[in-house]
Image (cartoon, helix red, strand yellow):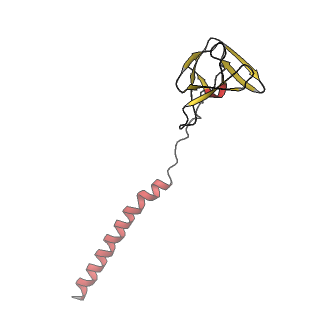
Amino acid sequence: MLESKKAIKIISSLVIGLSLGCVLTPIAQATSFTAPKLGTATQAPTNPAIKKGDKIFVVIKDTKNQKVAVYNKNAEKTSKKVAMGSTYTVKDVKKVNKKKIVRINKSQWLNIKDVVKN
């Protein structure tokens, strides 16, 4: 009887030891795995130079207010607004008071930060 208990203890301890060894082996292999080196990502220019005759698209960073201010030729805000998603052809581009603006029609100008090249 004592011999059978000893045999059962030995067999069960071997089974437990082997199962733990099998479980821990893949973990050790996974931790020693080195990830392949990836190449550096190339970034597309986010705001290419906008020139006369280019098509522009009005974008808005604020989701609550879906309109952007319209400026006059002196880069002063007017009471008019332009809706997001509007497309225009650039008539002229100029820099006034450190602010770059684009002309969309005879008297309306938009800040260059509010438009992207289409």
- Pick whichever, 57 or 46, lies toward us: 57
> What residue sits 25% from the left and 84% below the top?
5
Q: Indicate left or right for 114 with 11 as reference.
A: right
Measuring from the top left, give residue 29's x and y in whole percent. Answer: 46, 55
The N terminus, quarter of image: bottom left
As drawn, 66 above or below 57: below
As drawn, 74 above or below 21: above
Measuring from the top left, give residue 20's x and y in whole percent. Answer: 37, 67
- Pick whichever, 70 or 2, lies toward us: 70
The part of the image, by quadrant, that contains residue 98 is top right
- Pick whichever, 63 or 24, lies toward us: 63
* Residue farthest along the right direction in this orientation: 97
The C terminus, quarter of image: top right
The part of the image, by quadrant, that contains residue 12 is bottom left
Measuring from the top left, give residue 48's x and y in whole percent. Answer: 64, 22
> What residue sits 24% from the left and 88% below the top?
2
- Pick whichever, 103 or 47, lies toward us: 103
Q: Indicate left or right for 75 with 35 as reference.
A: right
> What residue sits 38% from the left and 62% below the top?
23
